[in-house]
Amino acid sequence: MYKPFIQPPALVRQLYPNRLWRMNPLEQSVYLTFDDGPHPEITPFVLEQLSRAGAKATFFCIGSRVAAYPQVYQQIIEQGHRVGNHTHQHLHAWRTNQADYLNDVAAAANLIDSNLFRPPYGKLSWQMAKQIPTVIKEPAQIVMWDILSGDFDQRLTVAGCLENCRRFLRPGSIIVLHDSEKAWGRLSVLLPALISLTASAGYSLKSLP
């Protein structure tokens, strides 16, 4: 079974230096990101939690879900958060030919006005990465992560997910969460706890610039 790194090793980051792994380590800020939405119930919950904390975040949306729930997508934007492209059908780049994958990203770009792109599963070939700027808004930025919370992993507890974040939390961390049904059982408890954790550590929560 595929097990992604909670925090990608330095070697992996060095192999893909043009991808965004972490923000400015000199600023006392953390960047929450939410993949796989929007969702008609879960995304509004996330927005409410962020609003209560005066926090901003970035939502990497699936195009087909934007088409299904445009009001929720608009709510994200109206509340001052950033959005990013997460493909139209949540495709796995290593299991999809390049033309089909790029067409799928382009389909999402018709609905998601953003220069930010995060590949589902964190998978993207060198060739596909070179072509991403041709199908999304310039200047294109491929966004990865500094911390993978693991909220999507049904083998993990909320405590385990929170410990993943606490252990690796540092200035500039980009943290991956999911506003999706698969993650909901953990996210519903994890998000308030994570907001409290970052606040107590003196971090501000920002959206990606």
Image (cartoon, rainbow, N blue to C red):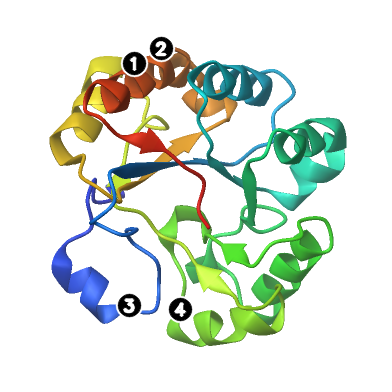
Secondary structure at badge 3 equals: loop
Front label number (4 vs 2): 2
- Whether pointer 4 and pointer 3 mark residues with C-beta atoms closer than 8 Å, the reply is no
- Distance of mark 2 from mark 1, alpha carbons? 7 Å
Q: What numbered label is drawn on residue 193?
A: 1
**Side of 136 where 164 appears, left or right:** left
Total tally of numbered discs in the picture: 4
Q: On the image, numbered disc 2 is attached to which residue?
A: 189
- Residue 28 percent across, percent down from the top left: 28, 44
- The mark nearer the N terminus, 2 or 3, is 3
- The mark nearer the N terminus, 4 or 2, is 4
Q: On the image, numbered disc 4 is attached to which residue?
A: 125
- Distance of mark 4 from mark 3, alpha carbons? 11 Å
- Residue 66 percent across, percent down from the top left: 79, 43
Q: Is residue 69 above or below residue 200?
A: below
- The mark nearer the N terminus, 4 or 1, is 4
Amino acid residing under circle 2: Val
Q: Is residue 129 above or below residue 32?
A: below
- The mark nearer the N terminus, 4 or 3, is 3
- Distance of mark 2 from mark 3, alpha carbons? 33 Å
Q: Is residue 103 above or below residue 169?
A: below
- Distance of mark 4 from mark 2, alpha carbons? 35 Å
**Measuring 34% from the left and 62% from the top, which residue is drawn there?**
21
- Whether pointer 2 and pointer 1 mark residues with C-beta atoms closer than 8 Å, the reply is yes
Q: What numbered label is drawn on residue 16?
A: 3
Q: Is residue 206 above or below residue 142?
A: above
**Measuring 68% from the left and 75% from the top, which residue is drawn there?**
102
- Whether pointer 4 and pointer 2 mark residues with C-beta atoms closer than 8 Å, the reply is no
